Amino acid sequence: MSKNTVSNRFRTVDVDEYDENKFVDEEDGGENQLPDIVHVASLTPLCTGNLMEALQAVLKNPPINTKNQNVKDCAEGLVLKVLSAFKSSDVDKGVQSLDKNGVDLLMKYIYKGFETPSDNSSAVLLQWHEKALSAGGLGCIVRVLTARKTV
Amino acid sequence: MAYHSFLLEPISCHSWNKDRTQIALCPNNHDVHIYKKDGTKWTKIHELKEHNGQVTGIDWAPESNRIVTCGTDRNAYVWSLKGEVWKPTLVILRINRAARCVSWSPKENKFAVGSGSRLISICYFEQENDWWVCKHIKKPIRSTVLSLDWHPNNVLLAAGSCDFKCRVFSAYIKEVEEKPGPTVWGSKMPFGEVLFESGPSGVSGGAGEGAGGGWVHGVCFSHSGNRLAWTSHDSTVAIAEGGKTSTISSLSSETLPLLCVSFITENSLVAAGHDCYPVLFVYDGTKGSVTFGGKLDVPKQTSQRGISARERFQNLDRRATSSETTEQGLESLHKNSISQISVLEGGKSKCSTFCTTGMDGGMVTWDVKSLESDLKDLKIV
């Protein structure tokens, strides 16, 4: 059998890149100044102890469309703060106050939070997870897994 | 509800003949087996061996008694019964990936094959050359076509695909039919025209959380053809009504993703999937909303025996809950995901029996009337 003595560089070419029918994701631009507004809107109720309002505020306008990772991290940190501020007995009431889309969004943040665990975050998130699961069912988790635009 | 276990392997696909005495199914291999009903027993009468890859779609044309099968070997065969034997005719689909689903049109003069090569092949019989010819619908499909359903006018075809969209195409072939009249989905229908395309995850139902969506597993036209329902992998069911407004109503369900869906009346649909039991959804045309109608399955046997403290702690240890159910298995009739639903009697407008097959190798025939009486507050409008 003849050995290929000519250059082997063609083996590193990614043919799928040149396929004219290649699937390209549709992207829209995102808004970058949201976290500041959300930051203020959620910290004030947090300081005064009105946790329900803080929850609603922090779940409004999630940074789904933006590609800026900082914005996403910032939002996630805020959500985690609010979730940790809740007492264990109030978690259930918090979940009940959300509508269907809110529960889906909450579940997204919970799983995002699981990805980067810090001292007590997992325990808090697990409590929220249990309540959100009973409200949203398995479909809620499936939607987190199949969502193409992550929080 | 009769449960019949055909095999241990999953049933990849199935199709019934016209009088519902014979069923053709694929036992997850390269063949198609045809079973005949003898009272309550099923006997295998034919084995159709021609494919070189798993058979992914079977459809049995009721009037002309022909079976079309398609498989992962990129071929489709049309089988006709000659005497006692089924004889295959190869159809060249000109695809370079596996075929995934196949469906005869209502008038049975053509059939559509959805494949992984991102296109739909519409095949019709050419008399002069005495063979099946196919035409492709390519744009704007961007991924595998998972499911197909024909509109009653024999021209429109709904396709659900892995690019998260459900579309209605025109499959008008001028060689075999006349120009179709206008429908609610549109009036100009040249071949390959897209008359409807769903957004990523439906529009109504609250703020709508932006793009998401999942692979569209099952599509179904209603009996009149004015409504189209589809289920997708993000556990949602959506219904679109053709017309100028073309509204889409969707419901995010709490179940695992549904794999197949069928209308049983103009307003109700039955869907089934990874949760192993069929569920009913009711569509309200005036409000444009889809609501969960109920779980269709054997009624739960409530055991009244108490549970001792020891058992409670044991359950807590093993299963992290102290609930009473000590049953190890699933409570549904099917023991694994349901992959296909077919209407047996009554058509899609007044279905009285439907059948489901799944990955557990079993087939269940469901009787709508007895379901309505067994399960309280189940209303099929």
Image: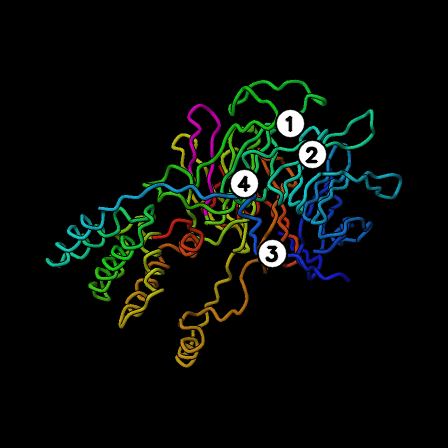
Report the disc number at residue B142.
4
Mark 3: amino acid: Arg
Task: Answer yes or no: is residue B210 visible.
Answer: yes
SS for tag 2?
strand
Return the residue at label 1: B154
Mark 4: amino acid: Arg
Q: CA distance from mark 2 to mark 3?
A: 41 Å
The residue depicted at 53 percent of the width and 70 percent of the height is B328
Q: Chain of mark 1?
A: B
The residue depicted at 40 percent of the width and 43 percent of the height is B211
The residue depicted at 72 percent of the width and 22 percent of the height is B175
Q: CA distance from mark 1 to mark 2?
A: 10 Å
Q: Is residue B239 magenta?
A: yes
Q: Are marks 2 and 4 in contact (CB under 8 Å)?
A: no
| Residue A127 percent coordinates (x, y) | 31, 66
Q: CA distance from mark 2 to mark 4?
A: 21 Å
- Nearest the eye: B241 or B56: B56
Q: Earlier in the sequence, mark 4 or mark 1?
A: 4
Mark 2: amino acid: Phe
Task: Answer yes or no: is residue B261 visible.
Answer: no
> Which part of the image, by quadrant, shows the N terminus of chain A?
bottom right
Q: Chain of mark 2?
A: B
Q: Is residue A112 magenta?
A: no
Report the disc number at residue A11.
3
Q: Residues within 10 Å of mark 2 (few under 14, many from 20)?
A: many
Left or right of residue B353, residue A90 in this image: left
Q: Chain of mark 4?
A: B
Badge 2 and badge 3 both on one subunit: no
Mark 1: amino acid: Asn
Which range of residues does the magenta coloring cover? B236-249
Return the residue at label 2: B111
